[in-house]
Image: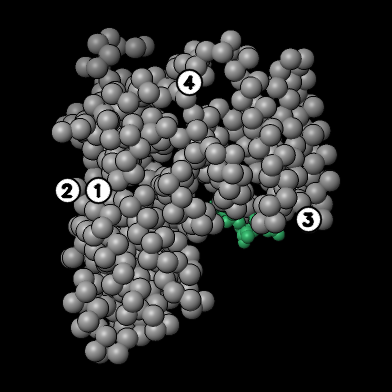
Amino acid sequence: MANKRVLRVMVAKPGLDGHDRGARIIARAFRDAGFEVIYTGLHQSPEEIVEAAIQEDVDMIGLSSLAGAHNYLFPRTVELLREKGGDDIVVCGGGIFPDNDISELKASGIKEVFTPGTPLTEIIEWVQENVKPRGG
Amino acid sequence: MTSVAEKVKAGDVRTVARLIRDIDDGMPGVKKTLKELYPYTGRAHVIGITGSPGVGKSTLVDQMINHLRKKGKTVGTLAIDPTSPFSGGAILGDRVRMQRHAMDQGVYIRSMATRGHFGGLTHSTRSAIDVLDAMGKDYIIVETVGVGQDEVDVVKAAHTTIIVLVPGMGDDIQAIKAGILEIGDIFVINKSEREGTDKTLSDIRAMIEMDPDKYAKGKWKPPILKTEAVFDKGVSEFLEEIDKHWEYLKESCDGKALRKTRKKVRDELAELIKNRFIKDILNNLIKSKEFDKAVDSILNGTIDPYTACDNVMLPILGTRKK
Ligand SMILES: Nc1nc2c(ncn2[C@@H]2O[C@H](COP(=O)(O)OP(=O)(O)OP(=O)(O)O)[C@@H](O)[C@H]2O)c(=O)[nH]1
Ligand SMILES: [Mg+2]
């Protein structure tokens, strides 16, 4: 019964593409870094992701998307979180994005964006530095 | 300002989610809220579901939720997966199978990790059950992988315990016999479209019937059901048995609130005391100088561990045991 916060993160796959290999790899890396990882599976709408994130009391949502719909799906997730009072949940994204999109995603409230080839250790360090368990 | 307990009772999802987190993280403030919520617990039917990895527990829970919602019942689910002993992290993947209920306000799903601290699993799970109960859920379903003692303890917190099996687990059945057979109120053979279902069914039946005292007249005799969770087959029959078991429980304790049967109260109180011992006494003890000294003495051969234990315990127990 350690009085100790454990970081909880959600790995979610919005959109239509049917590959979750990347999401599974990152989920495992997060577990090995000592986080509790909630995985929601494929084809999730932003509404479903946000609802799950609130029920699970996560500190961060990692959105993974290969298909192009990120320009809508990622910002929509952030927007819904704000509506639902979950604006202290950090959202970051992973996938293939044109440079233009990256700056727009960040402007819309996605805190960081990781493209293929980013070493897992780098992603984990980023999380450890930028995501703190909510509620102190 | 409305208190946390008030918000829980009103069904506020964010408050519930945060409170369960605080319980899990061992935050000191939660005790006050749990005390306030206790009078509002004891209403829900708590169902524990356990079984080896991959037998289809989560798929079954997903279908149960679906059926219960059609009957207008509300459902809370706690899906528990093991913490990695190496990193302390965990992958909590049960939600994948239940995520279609995410938008349904009558369903609350929470993934939890075992976390591996002494008695921690059972302690936080029981408290989380209370929270969902006070929140007003009609059914609370707890899924655990049935491996360790901790999981078995969690299941003891349930009113109705379900053991999920799959056909053709010959050796596994032996293992189950040794451990969790006794706690099963209902047995489910899932994936029953597969070969070997009838063999598995008769094996379990034989085991149950070997225990004539336990299942004597008037006592609950665990039914054995076949399901195909992915195809939604056998699930409504399964839920009927769950309701029958609930009726049986209510009759056998004269309609008293089930939560307040003597046995459940004893279990729960003993567990709270055990947790306090560990948290407040054991953890301090092993940090003390006396403890280190005792370890040194054992290492350099001047004392045996039994005497060392007596010595360390002396200030707490007050008398020296022979
Ligand atoms: N053939 C068949 N497959 C099933 C049935 N029920 C579930 N499954 C499949 O079995 C696999 C495991 O199902 P889960 O529901 O995740 O099993 P679980 O017991 O919750 O697994 P863990 O939580 O990992 O221990 C999935 O691929 C399901 O689709 C069934 O009746 N028949
Ligand atoms: Mg499962």
Q: Residues within 10 Å of mark 2 (few under 14, many from 20)?
A: few
Give the alpha-carbon distance from disc 1 to disc 3, as whole Å.
44 Å
Task: Please state which of the two labelled residues, at mark 4 or mark 1, is closer to the viewer.
Answer: 4
For badge 1, the amino acid type reads Arg
Q: Residue B159: give x, y in percent of width and height.
A: 55, 27
Q: Which chain letter goes with mark 1?
A: A
Q: Earlier in the sequence, mark 2 or mark 1?
A: 1
- Element assignment for label 3: loop
Q: Which residue is mark 3?
A: B193
Give the alpha-carbon distance from disc 2 to disc 1, as whole Å.
8 Å
- Element assignment for label 4: helix
What residue sits 45% from the left and 54% below the top?
B102
Q: Is residue A53 above or below residue A127?
A: above
Q: Which residue is mark 4?
A: B259
Q: Pointers 2 and 3 in contact (CB under 8 A)?
A: no
For badge 4, the amino acid type reads Arg
